[in-house]
Amino acid sequence: MGGVSVRRNRAGRVVPAVVAAALLAGCTAPAADPGTPTAPVGAPSASATPARTLTGDKKATGQALPAQVAGWTLDRRQTAGGAASGFYTRPGAQGDLVITLTPVPLTDDALAHALDDPQPVGAATCGVLPGAGTTACYRPLEGGNLRVAGALPVADLAAVADAVHATLK
């Protein structure tokens, strides 16, 4: 499929990983993806249980990313589609961290598609973003989510996610 990472959902349907990651990052997918097969009208659902929406104790909207967190300094901000991203640097670090507040609620199914080998680390769910090779941790928020991504060990990313979460109102 031309360089696009492809995964199969629980029903065996092909789901581009880019679409799953975009949904979690605040973008929305088109109403109908012509490349994804659909079940005929009236066909039984392939999934016995619907995706569970995850929520947190702090709101996703009306928040500001901190200027500094866990030794990382905000270098620049970017907003798109209602999501606010901050690019953080730290002296001696091999790369940046990207911290994103997104007004798109997480579901357990979306996390399963957005991360390879998702694993709980405290209040976060962490894993590798398919196709990107970057590690990310997600924390559910009320009406959205917090994502921290970068080239750090999972435990360190989860600690940064906790530190950012602590700054939210």
Image (cartoon, helix red, strand yellow):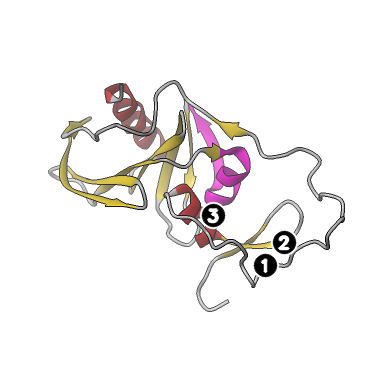
Q: Residue at x 30, y 21 (%)?
A: 169
- Compared with residue 56, is residue 4 higher up or lower down, i.e. above or below? below
Residue 40 is situated, as x and y percent measured from the top left of the image, at: 83, 63
Sequence-first disc among 2 and 3: 2
Q: Which residue is mark 3?
A: 20
Residue 140 is situated, as x and y percent measured from the top left of the image, at: 47, 32
User: In terms of depth relative to the viewer, which is nearer, 140 or 38?
Assistant: 38
Residue type at mark 3: give it.
Answer: Ala
User: In terms of depth relative to the viewer, which is nearer, 143 or 19?
Assistant: 143
Residue 157 is situated, as x and y percent measured from the top left of the image, at: 36, 37
Q: Is residue 118 magenta?
A: yes
Q: Which residue is mark 2?
A: 13
* Residue 38 seen in the figure: yes
Residue 95 lies left or right of residue 156; in this view the side is left
Sequence-first disc among 2 and 1: 2
* Residue 98 seen in the figure: no
Question: Do tag 2 and tag 1 residues touch (Cβ < 8 Å)?
Answer: yes
Q: Residue at x 47, y 42 (%)?
A: 104
Question: Do tag 2 and tag 3 residues touch (Cβ < 8 Å)?
Answer: no
Q: Which mark is residue 36?
A: 1
